[in-house]
Image (cartoon, rainbow, N blue to C red):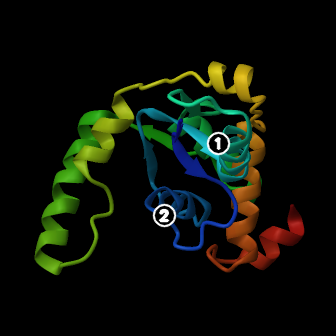
């Protein structure tokens, strides 16, 4: 049996992951816009629960996809900016994002640092790749919390753990 979670996100992203870093830039108000596109994701807590359910109830040879749903970057950013009381962000057209990705990759090759954004990541966001977790819901009883709740919980976790400038005041306000 194989369990296939999509992009895993949620509170506890200590790294933070690349996606978590993207969320932190939105929360800090340093992202001028969000790239056009979206992705399928699952809350880490729901992914863990789904994996346990698969171990207990899954059938040999079967594959189970764990995905809440597809969400646009604009939708994700809206929840985050609402959570911290910041203005909504504009959506960056794909060609502008690809140009930014090119220069970001070029700069990182010179400095040795990580690119702010890659053309590959932007192309992935454009793919509109949606998957279904119907089989995991039906056969394993997998459940997924609302995406807004995941994003709010993750934002509050980043605030409480010092990833967001002025986070203490934001946490008290929420």
Return the mark for residue 17. Answer: 2
What residue appears at the point 71 percent right and 47 percent down from the top-left corner? 52
Residue 85 figure quarter: bottom right
Asked whether, in this view, residue 124 is left or right of residue 139, the answer is left
What residue appears at the point 31 percent right and 42 percent down from the top-left corner? 122
What residue appears at the point 79 percent right and 69 percent down from the top-left corner? 170
Q: Nearer the viewer, residue 39 or 27?
A: 39
Q: In the displayed structure, would residue 132 be above or below residue 151?
A: above
Q: Secondary structure at mark 1?
A: helix
Q: Nearer the viewer, residue 81 or 121?
A: 121
Residue 106 figure quarter: bottom left
Return the mark for residue 78. Answer: 1
Q: How many numbered discs?
A: 2
Disc nearest the viewer among 1 and 2: 2
| x then y, percent, for residue 162 | 67, 80
Q: Earlier in the sequence, mark 1 or mark 2?
A: 2
What residue appears at the point 72 percent right and 45 percent down from the top-left corner? 46
Q: Secondary structure at mark 2?
A: loop
Q: CA distance from mark 1 to mark 2?
A: 20 Å
| x then y, percent, for residue 124 | 33, 37
Q: In the displayed structure, would residue 123 be above or below residue 127?
A: below
Q: Nearer the viewer, residue 104 or 42?
A: 42
Query: Which quadrant does the C terminus fall into?
Result: bottom right
């Amino acid at each position: 049996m194989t369990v296939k979670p999509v992009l895993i996100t949620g509170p506890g992203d200590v790294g933070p992951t690349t996606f978590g870093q993207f969320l932190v830039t939105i929360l800090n108000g340093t992202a001028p816009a969000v790239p056009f596109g979206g992705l399928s994701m699952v809350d880490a807590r729901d992914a863990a629960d789904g994996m346990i359910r698969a171990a207990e109830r899954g059938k040999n040879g079967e594959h189970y996809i764990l995905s809440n749903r597809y969400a646009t970057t604009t939708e994700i950013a809206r929840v985050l900016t609402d959570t911290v009381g910041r203005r909504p962000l504009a959506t960056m057209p794909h060609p502008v994002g690809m140009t930014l990705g090119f220069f970001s990759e070029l700069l990182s090759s010179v400095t040795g640092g990580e690119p702010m954004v890659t053309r590959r990541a932007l192309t992935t966001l454009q793919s509109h790749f949606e998957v279904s977790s119907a089989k995991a819901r039906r056969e394993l009883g997998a459940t997924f919390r609302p995406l807004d709740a995941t994003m709010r919980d993750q934002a509050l976790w980043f605030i409480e753990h010092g990833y967001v400038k002025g986070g203490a005041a934001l946490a008290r306000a929420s």
